[in-house]
Image (cartoon, rainbow, N blue to C red):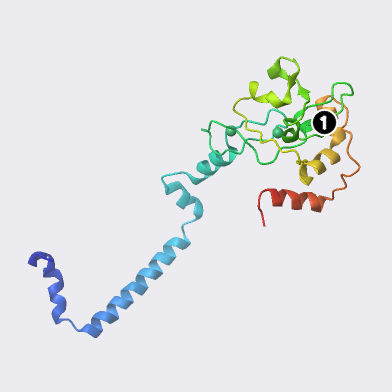
Amino acid sequence: MVISQDALGAFMILNNADQEQFAHWLTQCVKDMANTLGEKFKHTNIQMKLKKLHVNPQNELFTKLIGCGNQCPFCKAPCEAGGRFHTEHWTSLHRPEGLGRFRWRETQKLVIDVCSSSVLSDKNFRCNATNGEWHPYKRYTDFFPDWENAPDASLQASDYWKYVLKKFNKRFAEAYDAKPADILSLWHISLEQAKASIKESFNIK
Ligand SMILES: [Zn+2]
Ligand SMILES: [Zn+2]
């Protein structure tokens, strides 16, 4: 490697330097530097650091978490596809459809079925999108082509959403101008079980 003599000039002086002294001052200098930096960081709070970043982390996180704002056409669970630009909306946790205002025609009682099961059934639905006309759940993509609702025959609502519907059944019914859902007698779920269920669904330890 060729290094020009000019560039070396400043360092050649060190050839005659006292090595111990040099090591001493170098160590001292590094210590001082650490102290100065430490002091400086003490007076810099997280807000100031965030302000100086090129990307704004709050905004990035917000956009990522808020997603596209689309909701499942049946249970109104928010789309989890992340970000704004995707061709297919999906959610990992569908809810009892009553929470999305769906009720039985004859009784006006809120529906406890989960849409992931309904889309496998021979039942029909109607809503604003169908102009109030009955339409088979199995062909829901005729009206909602960009919603992926993975059919799951075994799926019941998570304990969390069962708990929510059971606890606030009457209030949902009032708010949605419907009759309270017929809650299955099997739905004995404590608040602890409900919390554990939501943690499990989102892998929170
Ligand atoms: Zn749904
Ligand atoms: Zn989406």
Query: In this orientation, does residue 143 appear?
Result: no
- Tell me what residue is drawn at x 54 percent, y 44 percent: 61
Q: In the structure shown, which secondary structural element does the residue marked by tag 1 occupy?
A: loop
In the displayed structure image, the side of residue 61 where residue 117 appears, left or right: right
Quick one: label 1, few (<14), some, or many (20+) residues within 10 Å? many
Q: Ligand 1: does it lie within 8 Å of the C-beta at label 1? A: no
124 relative to 85, above or below: above
Q: Nearer the viewer, residue 38 or 105?
A: 105
Residue 13's x, y, as percent? 13, 75
Q: Nearer the viewer, residue 43 or 124?
A: 124
Which quarter of the picture shows residue 138? Answer: top right
- Tell me what residue is drawn at x 8 percent, y 67 percent: 5
Residue 202's x, y, as percent? 66, 49
Find ligand 2 in the image and state its quadrant. Answer: top right
Residue 184's x, y, as percent? 89, 39
Residue 146's x, y, as percent? 59, 28
In the displayed structure image, the side of residue 202 where residue 17 appears, left or right: left
Which quadrant would the C terminus be assigned to in this image?
bottom right
152 relative to 132, above or below: below
Which quadrant would the N terminus be assigned to in this image?
bottom left
Q: How many marks?
A: 1
Q: Amino acid at mark 1?
A: Val
In the displayed structure image, the side of residue 155 where residue 34 appears, left or right: left
Residue at label 1? 111
8 relative to 94, above or below: below
Query: In this orientation, does residue 117 appear?
Result: yes
- Tell me what residue is drawn at x 66 percent, y 41 percent: 92
Q: Nearer the viewer, residue 131 or 165?
A: 131
Which quarter of the picture shows residue 2? Answer: bottom left
Q: Residue most toward the left?
A: 5
